[in-house]
Amino acid sequence: MITLSIMLATLMQTLDSTIANVALPHMQGTLSASQDEISWVLTSYIVAAAIATPLTGWLAARLGVKRLLAIAVSGFTVASLLCGLSETLAQIVGARLLQGLFGAALVPLSQSILLDINPRDKQPQAMAIWGVGVMVGPILGPTLGGWLTDSYNWRWVFLINLPIGAFALFGVLTYLPRSKPSARQALDFFGFITLSLAIGALQAMLDRGQQLDWFGSLEIRIEAAVALVSFVFFALHTATAGKGSFFRYELLKDSNFVTGTCFIFVIGAVMYATRALLPPMLEALMGYPVATTGLVTAPSGVGTMVAMLIAGRLVGRMDVRMMLLAGFLVSAVALYQMMGYTLVLSQSDIVWPGVIQGVGLGFVFVPLSAVTFATLAPELRADGTAIFSLMRNIGSSIGISVIQAQVTRNTQVVHASLVEHMNPANAALMQNYDLGSPSTLESLNRMVTQQASMIAYVDAFKLMFVATLCVVPLLAIVRSRRRAAGEDAPHVAMD
């Protein structure tokens, strides 16, 4: 019951990271907002969650895990109600800020609790269950959001959280044992504020950069400057504050945790970015409605779920490096298949590479989550899981922003290259098209734009394919050690 309750809370939070995306056009009309204004419905949630995530460990120590989780679930549920009842843009942006602030603790706390309530030999299976909620939620979000918006109303994208949140809160209050708050030092406000400013400004820059033409925008330049200056101050303060620092030095002494955190950042940047490419490609180039896009991309979540459950049973019985290698290579196979995409695709051409990539991601995520916390002291888990989640989110934000910028840039470059050949000197073109007709020119431009966009997407898949293979040599820094006599569970070391 504890596992079910906290996984419902986790699923609720991860679903909301993507479920509202498809409902934005409907919200825009209801709230009388411009395209730039309505994007703050997404940005406010992302930035608030990023700022509040590092605070999870300190709050868990001061309030106790059960009390903090109950506050987070109830606050997130109430904020979801406020989102569904919003009548103005300011109201929904404010409610989304509350959602992000309360929801930030749900994912790291759920991971920490699953590690605490399971013996070490069961922790890989626990991480598999946790990974299903973390990974499948964002994948199913657009599908569920599209169905709710088309069948009912965009408000149900948020109101659906009410029964889930109520059940999760009941389970937490009823079954989760109460933990005593620890006598941790007072909050390092300067460290927290500088880190929060750095993370919040970075996330805002990454989320809005594509829309605002990156450093051609004053807003993006200001956000980049704030992120850089704040992080420098945070680093200098952390180096000189000693044990009073907001960031706990003890985390850096655990080689498993440090290496695993670096890996999850790279994985977030390389593997998560491909998930952001397919929906806009299918909707913009192939005319797929939102519901159909969700149906053909959702099976990748099934592949991830099955792979995670299998991987959870293999951790400790199989060399973790082999599992990670298998995951990366399977993902590379899926990307290789995507490199052959054209404007003429059947739905099976989309479904099966997605399923294969989901399997690869599952075989990477579970062993990595298990070994990262295999040797971390229990009192550090709340802080460690918060940093782990934060680095995964930052890595995925950077990867998605880079790949989207690459697609936009390559579309323009390829479009210009193709248009160069559309002139009266091209005999085949003149024979088949009347270049003096405005409607013909408009039709040709639409065709060229489609082809240029498709080439740009294929180039992006090639980039992700190469990047995935480049991650493989990093497995050399992972060291697997067999269980010593007398150890109560499989133990994997990374350095």
Image (tube, rainbow, N blue to C red):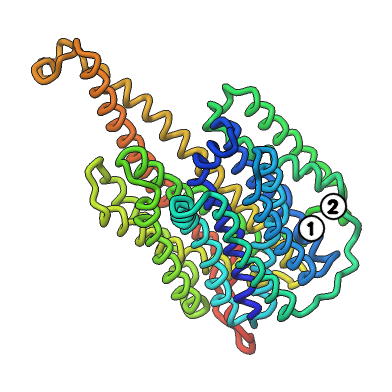
The residue that disc 1 covers is 248
Q: Nearer the viewer, residue 279 or 342?
A: 279
Element assignment for label 1: loop
Q: Quadrant of the N terminus?
A: bottom right
Q: Determine whether label 1 and label 2 are within 8 Å by CB.
A: yes
Give the residue type at disc 1.
Arg
Q: Residue at x 41, y 35 (%)?
A: 407
Whether 433 is drawn above or below 350: the answer is: above
Give the label on residue 245, or none.
Answer: 2
Residue 296 x %, y %: 34, 56
Q: Residues within 10 Å of mark 2 (few under 14, many from 20)?
A: many
Q: Nearer the viewer, residue 262 or 33?
A: 33
Q: Is 398 placed left or right of 143 in the picture?
A: right
In space, the residues marked 1 and 2 are separated at their CA atoms by: 7 Å
Residue 125 x %, y %: 54, 77
Please say whether residue 376 is visible from this viewpoint.
Answer: yes
Please say whether residue 206 is visible from this viewpoint.
Answer: no
Q: Is 243 placed left or right of 258 in the picture?
A: right
Q: Nearer the viewer, residue 130 or 37?
A: 37
Whether 49 is drawn above or below 412: the answer is: below
Give the residue type at disc 2.
Ser
Q: Residue at x 29, y 21 (%)?
A: 417
Q: Residue at x 78, y 57 (%)?
A: 249
Whether 335 is drawn above or below 429: the answer is: below
Hey, which quadrant is residue 294 in on the image?
bottom left
Q: How many marks?
A: 2
Q: Quadrant of the C terminus?
A: bottom right
Q: Is 448 placed left or right of 136 in the picture?
A: left
